[in-house]
């Protein structure tokens, strides 16, 4: 994590010391590095080496307006899966013509919002969705640009909750019915079929599933063109994994090369939808130790961050590095802890049996590689306020989402008239 380093004994985010930030913002809080976001995006762009491709940042990984705007100013488009994400992308400055609307359950009003905005394309996942979009577009006197999402029945070899490309998953049109669906789309007055889309899952660390899915996509393109159809765009999705500890993660250059070898000779514009790869390492969650609790069989670090702030460990059995904000002495003996939060659930943990240096109440810890699927999946369970988010750039910082007050939280509720 080159953007989060120790300086003078204290962990910094770029040029900002995290202990000072904790005093200013309060804990827990998320912190994102502008340099990290920029470097990751530029590296993705450079991997294409001038080839015809678009990068549509996947908002579901982190939908903070400052993060989206950072990518938009670098030239990114957006991959959205709801009207809320569509509106976030537009508000952050993403041009509508660079927005791809994906998702298996788009409602009529969401499709209408996409048509009104004039987005780049809808990734359609079923015949009923195609028919609804056709009727809405015809009623508006428009033609919706559409890519049919293919379910290639490829095992992504990732966690079962984030695999999306097997026949048993809810996503996409099964491989054997794509040609028929494309033909129907071509006959619809309100639909302009422009290509195919595929997305087989998230946190992929092996390129072989991509290679298999892209090969099936290339075969489909040949078949559709033989049927007389125009195929000008291929949306290859996202899902490229990052290393949360010492597991090997593929290089972005190898990933892009895999795509180009499979479909680069088809004359199609390629669309990529990276999320985690762009933002995962760019964010940390900073928390303070409340108690050090030593039990008979286990010892616990009780933090002020909890599963409602970062749900990935309990939801996906995910590992996140945990780093003391104060640099530990080199000779300090490690102790093993379960790192837990204050939420009234046994599932409220951030790490199990983790080796950490000696810690005391009040010490600060940074939960690393938390920029993706962290704050965006947070909740107010146990009536805990949402965690604030901070963006740093050099030695500057800005709160890009404030912590709500208890009054603000309670004021969202309404008592009925009879009370």
Image (spheres, helix red, strand yellow):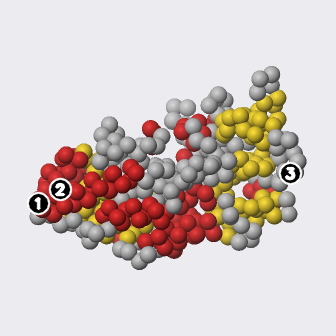
Instruction: Return the residue at label 1.
Output: 227
Q: Work out whether residue 288 or residue 138 is closer to the camera in this orientation and state it.
A: 288
| Quadrant of residue 115 within the rendered picture | bottom left
* Quarter occupied by the C terminus: top right
Does the image show residue 311? no
Does the image show residue 253? yes
**Image x and y of residue 391, in percent:** 65, 64
* Quarter occupied by the N terminus: bottom right
**Image x and y of residue 98, in percent:** 38, 69
Q: Work out whether residue 73 or residue 153 is closer to the camera in this orientation and state it.
A: 153
Q: Work out whether residue 297 or residue 22 is closer to the camera in this orientation and state it.
A: 297
User: Residue 330 shows which numbered tag?
Assistant: 3
Q: Is residue 116 left or right of residue 180?
A: right
Q: Secondary structure at mark 3?
A: loop
Instruction: Return the residue at label 2.
Output: 182
Q: Residue at x 43, y 53 (%)?
A: 207
Q: Count how many numbered circles sit on residues in the image.
A: 3
Q: Secondary structure at mark 1?
A: loop
């Amino acid at each position: 994590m080159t953007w989060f380093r120790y300086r003078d004994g204290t962990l910094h985010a770029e040029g900002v010391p995290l202990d000072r930030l904790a005093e200013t913002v309060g804990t827990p809080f998320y912190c994102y590095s502008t340099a990290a976001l920029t470097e990751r995006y530029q590296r993705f762009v450079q991997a294409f080496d001038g080839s015809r491709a678009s990068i549509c940042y996947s908002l579901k990984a982190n939908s903070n307006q400052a993060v989206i705007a950072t990518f938009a100013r670098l030239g990114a488009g957006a991959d959205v899966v709801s009207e809320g994400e569509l509106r976030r992308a537009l508000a952050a400055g993403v041009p509508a013509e660079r927005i791809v609307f994906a998702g298996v359950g788009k409602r009529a009003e969401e499709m209408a919002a996409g048509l009104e905005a004039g987005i780049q394309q809808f990734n359609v996942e079923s015949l009923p969705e195609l028919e609804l979009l056709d009727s809405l577009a015809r009623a508006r006197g428009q033609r919706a640009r559409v890519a049919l999402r293919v379910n290639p029945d490829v095992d992504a070899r990732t966690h079962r909750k984030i695999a999306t490309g097997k026949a048993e998953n809810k996503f996409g049109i099964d491989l054997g019915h794509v040609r028929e669906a494309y033909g129907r789309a071509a006959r619809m007055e309100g639909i302009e079929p422009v290509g195919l889309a595929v997305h087989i899952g998230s946190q992929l660390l092996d390129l072989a599933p991509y290679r298999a899915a892209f090969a099936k996509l290339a075969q489909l393109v040949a078949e559709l063109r033989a049927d007389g159809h125009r195929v000008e765009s291929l949306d290859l999705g996202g899902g490229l994994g990052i290393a949360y500890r010492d597991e090997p993660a593929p290089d972005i250059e190898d990933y892009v090369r895999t795509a180009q070898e499979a479909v680069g000779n088809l004359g199609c514009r390629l669309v990529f939808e990276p999320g985690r790869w762009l933002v995962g390492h760019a964010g940390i969650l900073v928390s303070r130790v409340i108690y050090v609790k030593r039990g008979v069989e286990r010892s616990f670090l009780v933090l002020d961050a909890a599963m409602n702030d970062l749900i990935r460990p309990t939801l996906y059995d995910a590992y996140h590095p945990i780093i003391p904000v104060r640099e530990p002495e080199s000779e300090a003996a490690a102790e093993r802890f379960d790192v837990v939060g204050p939420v009234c659930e046994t599932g409220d943990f951030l790490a199990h049996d983790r080796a950490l240096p000696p810690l005391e109440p009040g010490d600060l810890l940074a939960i690393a590689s938390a920029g993706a699927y962290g704050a965006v999946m947070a909740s107010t369970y146990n009536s805990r306020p949402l965690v604030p988010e901070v963006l740093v750039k050099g030695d500057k910082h800005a709160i890009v989402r404030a912590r709500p007050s208890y009054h603000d939280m309670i004021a969202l509720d309404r008592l009925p008239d009879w009370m």
